[in-house]
Image (cartoon, grey):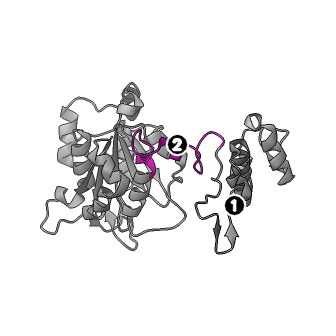
Amino acid sequence: MKIDIVSVFPEYFEVLNLSLLGKAQEKGLVEVTAHNLRDWTHDVHHSVDDTPVGGGAGMVMKPEVWSECLDELLHLEPTTVTCDSTVTCDSTADADDTASADAAEPAESATEIAANADTVPATDRPVLIFPSPSAPLFTQQDATELSHANHLLFGCGRYEGYDARIPQYYRAQGIDVREYSIGDYVLNGGEVAVSVMLEAITRLLPGFMGNAASIVEESYTGENALLEHRQYTKPADWRGIKVPDVLLSGDHAKVDRFRRDEALAKTNELRPDLIEALDCSKLDKADRKTLMALGWEVSGAHPRQR
């Protein structure tokens, strides 16, 4: 997997050379390159932002700088796009640019470009990802999907964020553009969010983890996802707190059942929305018994609280 990261602080990502992700790079499983957005500026101050149109506090990252950077990394030629109802996009050009565009071949519509892009296998298409506090929440399912991509390109916003036309333009170019939030809070920039998403994605790559079984029963993983059960290690009695006896019994079936019941109880307490999303047809009798004891009705398609 090839990963490009664009930031005004590329040195932030030196930490990615540590631990398992560093080893994955050494083994050739993933190639991570952090780029300095200011390398695509042309003024003496290397400016990447400007005042917001319409007024307001803060500064907004300029589309001209981002487009030069992204065009190069995505191997695209600058173009003028026309947008229809399927893509919200405002495209403006200077008078000279408009004259050049009129003399050239008509620009493809966003629908035509996207249709052509759909013929490319999903794993071969680059995915452009921007973290944003106003975007949909990034989930384990997103991480799993993105772990199958060959090329991910992350853009780290700063200040008041990036010009909204940037993702619009690249969607109109047929690029798979994603915007994600990692939680209901605001950070100073996208670097932390990108690090979170990158680790969640890359750890799912084949060969990344020392023991592939480590990721099988984790929280949010699988079709009927739950929170993971509690974990213990030696000693069995630590400062008066004992490991549950069943875990010392050597009876693997009982251990599995105990852990499953723990996962159901923990999810019920902390994330009942995950219980509501379970498919009742895929619950065994013991699951149903545990959920009923926790106050759930399991006779329908999905559990519902009594």
| Count of numbered labels shown in the rendering | 2
Q: Earlier in the sequence, mark 1 or mark 2?
A: 2
Q: Position of residue 55 (x, y in %)?
A: 38, 70
Quadrant for the N terminus, please: top left
**Residue 213, numbered circle:** 2
Q: Is residue 219 magenta?
A: yes
Residue 114 visible from this viewpoint: no
Q: Is residue 217 magenta?
A: yes
The residue located at (66%, 49%) in the rendering is 226
Residue 71 visible from this viewpoint: yes
Q: State the residue lying farthest toward the left.
A: 44
Is residue 117 shown above or below 272? Answer: above
Considering the whole magenta stretch, tell me its main secondary structure.
loop
Q: Secondary structure at mark 2?
A: helix
Label 1–label 2 contact, CB within 8 A: no
Is residue 117 shown above or below 33? Answer: above
**Residue 270, numbered circle:** 1
Mark 1 to mark 2 CA distance (whole Å): 25 Å
| Corner quadrant of residue 71 | top left
| Corner quadrant of residue 113 | top left
The residue located at (69%, 45%) in the rendering is 256
Q: Say what amino acid the circle numbered 2 marks.
A: Ala
Is residue 34 shown above or below 47? Answer: above
Dot 2: few (<14), some (14–19), or many (≥20) neighbours within 10 Å?
few
Q: Position of residue 129 (x, y in %)?
A: 39, 49
Magenta stretch bounds: 200-224
Is 98 left or right of 143, judged from the image as shown? left
Give the camera-side residue of 70 and 237: 237
Give the camera-side residue of 87 and 238: 238
Nearer the observer: mark 1 or 2; the answer is: 2
